[in-house]
Every structure is written in structure tokens, then in C-alpha cells.
């Protein structure tokens, strides 16, 4: 298999690791007949601890690689990269590019009744204030909290464990009245049941993965693609075995896993 054009008019999706697989799964549920190329930059995970300029460089290299394959659209399935790199990608890429932040904010705007909106995510995503700025600009009262341990809980297969429930209750304690809560990390859909139990029943959870899939499917499903067969290829910059193991916890991997040296992205 060559690195260029393995799939005709596929949709490109990338993340620093496996969390973006929840976005890929949401996209495939809405567009099961479409082909996808997923790139997990596991050799350089996590992005959140790196300087924004470095994350932009990583994202640009990945976007160049995927665009050279002939993808029809690019989905940044990473909150950190969406926060700091999406404007550069929109300007640079010859195809449409979407992040996961704006669709989540739009979805929260549609469902909130009181204007009290919460958002939870990783330390880096919350520190960037990407969600908070967008929500506050719409006049909402925003409560945000970083939940740094929840990614580890998910990747260890403990999403439904008592430990997960205890952590979620701890992170959500002391929140003001809200009627909407954005799950601002791609791992968090795996904790949806635990989070819903920890908040009031009338609090609506907004899954950024589902919101992103809705936006992308509306934009790209305007014309048929007879050559597409619902195939997926995963490119992984780190250990493919480790990727497959962790991805199994997220929901599994369908399709081929192809090792990709980071130097290929630098060259792009």
C-alpha cells in the first residue's frame, strides 16, 4: 500500500492519540458509506503540554500529509489543536477544515434554556479558554473545570467503575446552576452515563464529537460518492500495537493500521 491516495476522496481525521476515535465513530455513524483516513500522532502525545507554536507546526504537517492524499475534508478531532491551530489550517488547506470546539458551542447555544452553560475538559483545553471565550461572547454564564484524570480513567478501561463515578462527582462539585454541560474532551463521551448520573437530570450533555459529526455530514453529504465503501485506514506515528490496545478500550479499530514515521510529517 502506498502512502498517497489509498482511498478516493476520503475524509481526513486527526488527533494526538486515540481520543479522536470517538469523533471518527460519530462521523461513521452518520456517514457509514464514506471512506476515512485517521491519523493518530501518538509519538508526540499529549499536545496539551507543548507550546502552542509547536502544536501548530504538528497540525500543519499532518494537514499537509492528509491533503496530499486527496482527502475531501479535514476534521481536527483534538481540542488542543482545534483551539490553537484551526485558523492556520483553514487558511492553508485546499479543502474545508473543522475543529471540535465551534460545533460544541453551537450545539450548546441551541439547547440551553437558562444561559447557564458548563464545560469540562483537559487542563490545556480549559486553560486556552477557547470554549469559554466563545460562550461568553454569546452572553452565557459559563462555568468551566479541568478534569485531568478522566482521560486516564477512560484509557484504563474504567469508564463505568466506582472510581470514575467518584472522580466525576469530585470534579463537578461546587458548580453553579447550569442546564447544559459540554463534554469538551474527545474521551468524555465514554463517560457520558457516569457524568449524567452526577448532574441533575435536566442538565443536557453536549457531546462535541456528535456535534462535529453533524456539522461535517451536513457539509459533505450533498452529492453521492459511488467509489466510497465505508473503509478506514489508520496512520499511527507511535507504536501500532499500543495504539490498537488503547483504541480497543475506546471502542475498537476497524481497518488497517499503518505505521507512519514522524519524519514523513516533517517532510510534508
Image (cartoon, rainbow, N blue to C red):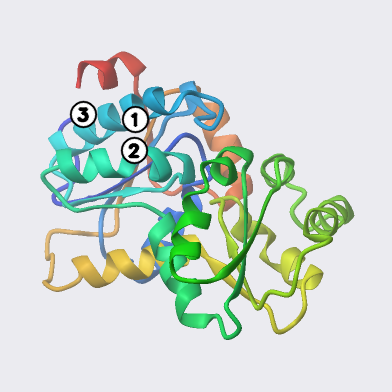
Q: Residue 263: x percent and y percent?
A: 30, 13
The residue tagged 1 is: 56
- Which residue shows up at 26% across the image and 30% down it? 60
Q: Distance between the residues labelled 2 and 3?
A: 24 Å
Q: Do the residues labelled 1 and 2 touch (CB within 8 Å)?
A: yes
Q: Is mark 3 on a helix, strand or loop?
A: loop
Q: Quadrant of the N terminus?
A: top left
| Of residues 256 and 13, the one drawn nearer to the viewer in this rendering | 13
Mark 1 vs mark 2: which is more N-terminal? 1
- Which residue shows up at 55% across the image and 69% down it? 206
The residue tagged 3 is: 3
Q: Residue 176: x percent and y percent?
A: 75, 69
| Of residues 115 and 31, the one drawn nearer to the viewer in this rendering | 115
Quarter of image, res 31 = bottom left
The residue tagged 2 is: 85
| Of residues 215 and 263, the one drawn nearer to the viewer in this rendering | 215
- Which residue shows up at 31% across the image and 44% down it? 86
Amino acid at each position: 500500500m502506498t502512502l498517497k491516495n489509498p482511498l478516493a476522496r476520503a475524509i481526513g481525521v486527526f488527533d494526538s492519540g486515540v481520543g479522536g476515535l470517538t469523533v471518527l465513530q460519530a462521523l461513521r455513524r452518520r456517514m457509514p458509506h464514506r471512506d476515512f483516513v485517521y491519523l493518530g500522532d501518538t509519538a508526540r502525545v499529549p499536545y496539551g503540554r507543548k507550546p502552542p507554536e509547536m502544536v501548530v507546526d504538528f497540525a500543519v504537517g499532518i494537514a499537509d500529509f492528509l491533503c496530499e492524499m486527496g482527502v475531501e475534508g479535514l476534521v481536527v478531532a483534538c481540542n488542543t489543536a482545534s483551539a490553537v491551530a484551526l485558523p492556520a489550517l483553514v487558511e492553508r488547506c485546499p479543502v474545508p477544515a473543522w475543529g471540535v470546539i465551534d460545533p460544541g458551542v453551537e450545539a450548546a447555544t441551541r439547547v440551553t434554556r437558562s444561559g447557564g452553560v458548563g464545560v469540562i475538559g483537559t487542563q490545556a483545553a480549559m486553560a486556552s479558554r477557547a470554549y469559554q471565550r466563545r460562550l461568553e461572547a454569546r452572553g452565557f454564564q459559563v462555568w468551566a473545570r479541568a478534569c485531568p484524570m478522566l482521560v486516564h480513567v477512560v484509557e484504563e478501561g474504567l469508564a463505568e467503575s466506582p472510581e470514575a463515578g467518584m472522580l466525576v462527582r469530585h470534579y463537578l462539585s461546587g458548580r453553579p446552576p447550569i442546564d447544559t454541560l459540554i463534554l469538551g474532551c474527545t474521551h468524555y463521551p465514554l463517560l457520558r452515563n457516569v457524568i449524567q448520573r452526577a448532574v441533575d437530570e435536566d442538565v443536557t450533555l453536549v457531546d462535541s464529537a456528535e456535534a462535529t459529526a453533524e456539522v461535517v455530514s451536513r457539509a459533505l453529504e450533498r452529492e453521492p460518492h459511488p467509489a466510497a465503501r465505508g473503509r478506514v485506514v489508520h496512520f499511527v506515528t507511535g507504536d501500532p500495537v499500543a495504539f490498537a490496545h488503547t483504541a480497543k478500550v475506546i471502542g475498537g479499530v476497524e481497518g488497517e493500521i499503518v505505521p507512519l514515521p514522524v519524519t514523513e510529517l516533517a517532510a510534508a
